[in-house]
Amino acid sequence: MNFDIPLFPESASSLASQVDNIYFFALGVSVVFSVLIAGTIFFFASRYKRRRVDEMGTPEQTNMMLELTWSVIPLLIMLFMFAWGTKVYLESYRVPRDADQYYVVGKRWMWKFQHPEGNREINTFHVPKGRPIELIITSEDVIHSLFIPAFRMKRDAVPGRYNTAWFEATKTGTYDIFCAEYCGTEHSLMVGKVIVMEPYEYDDWLQGNKPEQSLASSGAELFEAKACHTCHRLDSNARAPILANIAGKPRLLQNGKTVDATDTYLRESIMNPKAKIVAGYQPIMPTFQGQLTEEQLLELISYIKNLGADQAQTPADPAAEG
Amino acid sequence: MTPLVSTGKRIPDYLNAAYGLKSWLFTTDHKRIALLYMASVTMFFFLGGLMAVLIRLELVTPQGDLVEPDVYNRLFTMHGIIMVFFFLIPAIPATLGNFLIPIMIGAKDLAFPRINLGSWYVYNAGGLFTMYSILNGGVDTGWTFYTPFSTTFSNTYVLATGLGIFITGFSSIMTGLNFLVTIHRMRAPGLTWFRLPLFVWAHYATSIIMLLGTPVLAITVLLVALERSFHIGVFDPAYGGDPILFQHLFWFYSHPAVYIMVLPAMGVISELITCFARKRVFGYRFIAYSSVAIAVLGFLVWGHHMFTTGQSIYASTIFSVLSMLVAVPSAIKVFNWTATLYRGSISWDTPMLYALGFIGLFTIGGLTGVMLATLGIDIHVHDTYFVVAHFHYIMVGGTIMGYLGGIHFWWPKITGRMYPAFWSKFAAITIFIGFNLTFFPQFILGYMGMPRRYHAYPDEWQVLNVMSSAGASILGVGYLIPMIYLAWSMRYGPRAEANPWGAVGLEWEIQSPPTAHNFETEPVVDKEAYAYTAEQGYVPPTKEAEFV
């Protein structure tokens, strides 16, 4: 048994120190108020301790100024904490433009990570230091929550939708990954390690574990294998929309509404195509519910997002890529 | 008003008005029903406590080596379900509230005595379903029943337990309805709203939540049952449902439910502080209105349980600021109680020790609640032991301290007996120390990153977990001591006078224990609550309360 009492977790991301700063501020406020209240109570209880059995208290008139003072001061302090906390929160959601996209799938009871280059890992996650990393998180079964204390980062993995989070590691080392949302028998064993490496080491690691193809090119093969390309062509929108350059863009639907083509939208359009029909098309696409794993879905989405993004390759020629 | 105790011949008290098991099981006397409830909630408290003992024993070592993971998951689930639905929610309203509200407002009983008795049967019927599922192996979903785990993946007794909670919810609705009608319609002549004891105000606010919130829980549990049995596709994404919708519905009730637990305790504290400072409460109207403010605002903050689910960041922002607003009325109460002590005549009797302990622990619970409402902090500490520590400071440090303080305050009134001064103070201090040793280390563990509901954990967290488990054993002893001396006092305790503490309030103007109809003549109220001044006719006692 280790008898050191740990008091504070390691800080290894750009967000960590910001979370810690509000925490210390809030802790300071809490200590001041707790000591003040406890001290006052103890002082009054001793100073005005009953001396004779028939002693009576001295009545006080309610003091409006006092009531307002002790309502407004805590309110102002809290509004300050609210503003500060919200700023950090929004930052934790605002993914930098140059972030690389990694996919995370939670499954009872393991974490699966997919690098953009196609590397796959389970319960171990190699990442480069100093580069912003976007995580697109989902689950195959129940709700999980990806929690990396050293990064002060937590995001739920919800089946049927993609949540995004991001971090930029600032310190090389090995840090804990936990599942923070209770998920059944081996919830407390759904843990892993994130390994932060210098960027050049990371690139070496990627090379050394080079997979056969990138995520997007696996998606391209799948796109053909599932015969998506027979309707979703790059040169004709006769039967179905051209998918190049749609990711993240607003889509006008048949019912007149507009939705952004987020990852969750793309997923829904594959699994439940009739949910949102793009204006000008017939609801003729079949569902792929039960025919694709979460990983395959991610490959397809990665492929669609890459379409027209950095190359104008034809889907009929996936080998030209990577 | 003339004391009603000494007039005429002695009428048998409510305990001796009738005899035999039937006279208890078919009683419509709110005081007897309060005792029936007290027996039931005490049993559930010790059952839930037993599970806490096993949980803390498991966590003494980092490896999950005492019980199987599936057993551990059932233990914390059943601990949560029993403590929340079968102890904390009914604890104060159904026992002390039931006993005292009619007396405090000068009524002979609640508005609907049969509904009151019915609610106890309904509560126990729900309890039976829960006991049935425990005996068959229990439930492993966590007390929060998150979907799709509860609807699709758990192969434990979700339906039986859900049905138990569904049924018990109706007892809560019945109690809330009864209190609201009683407080509106049955106040004694002269007892205006602003002459009501703050205990009654707190229960009024609580009843609003019971009446408006509990049906939502019933609907939610029903939907879980339908989803689980027939896959109707409300929550399960595989059938086009939304698992996050469940969380919205669940917390729409279960966050306000926290105020069902803590508001009555706050009501108790207002009574204790005034009696043992022998002084009118400071800022009466502020405390009264703050109860209502907490009840109303409490319905608008549920989304703070969902900051990491991926709910809209704008929704999160609104929920964050509203959650902080709830802290203002809570702070108002704490400051007003503290101010009440100023220039009081403060006795350190046992109930007062609980009241002072409550303020300290509730303050820590409240401040850490503000930390959790701060979005930037919550993304790190959500679903960790920080949250576990926070809500135990509110529920155990708040509700249970309030409940025990109230029991010790009104025990002479309820049973007509006194309890040992030394042992009761010893137990109060033991509970305070044990509580802090149990739950304070959990704040540190939480910020370190220890997730809740973990059967096994990394080695470096062992010392803090051992401290927590050691504290829990002290806390457990602290809870057992009152069980012993209170049971003892029912038979051997010295007889209590009508008003052993020198307290103001209608309940202290009638005999201990009260007669079946509380008042032999209808009382007329001509003064404010907590009239502890000579001008208002207060006469302090001339001798100490007689303990053992």
Image: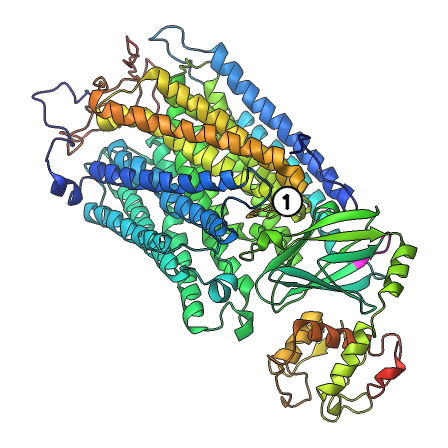
Magenta residue span: A129-133
Q: Which residue is mark 1?
A: B381
Q: Dot 1: what SS? A: helix
Give neighbour class at mark 1: few <14, some 14-19, many 20+ (Cα, 10 Å): many
Name the foreground residue: B435 vs B122.
B435
Residue B76 at x, y = what percent? Answer: 47, 47
- Residue A317 in which image quadrant: bottom right
Asked if residue A116 lies in the magenta stretch, the reply is no
In the picture as drawn, the residue positioned furthest to the left comes out as B9
Residue at 50% across / 65% down in the picture? B153
In the picture as drawn, the residue positioned furthest to the right comes out as A200
Name the foreground residue: B141 vs B498.
B141
Q: Is residue A149 left or right of residue B95?
A: right
Q: Is residue A154 left or right of residue B31?
A: right
Quadrant location, the C terminus of chain B? top left
Instruction: Name the residue type under label 1.
Output: Val
- Residue A32 in which image quadrant: top right
Q: Is residue A159 left or right of residue B14?
A: right
- Residue B401 in which image quadrant: top left
Residue A180 at x, y = what percent? Answer: 61, 52
Residue at 62% across / 33% down in the picture? B463
Q: Is residue B95 visible?
A: yes
Q: Which secondary structure class fits the magenta region best?
A: loop
Quadrant location, the N terminus of chain B? top left
Residue at 39% across / 19% down in the picture? B425
Residue B231 at x, y = what percent? Answer: 46, 73
Q: Chain of mark 1?
A: B
In the picture as drawn, the residue positioned furthest to the top comes out as A52
Residue at 33% across / 32% down in the picture? B196
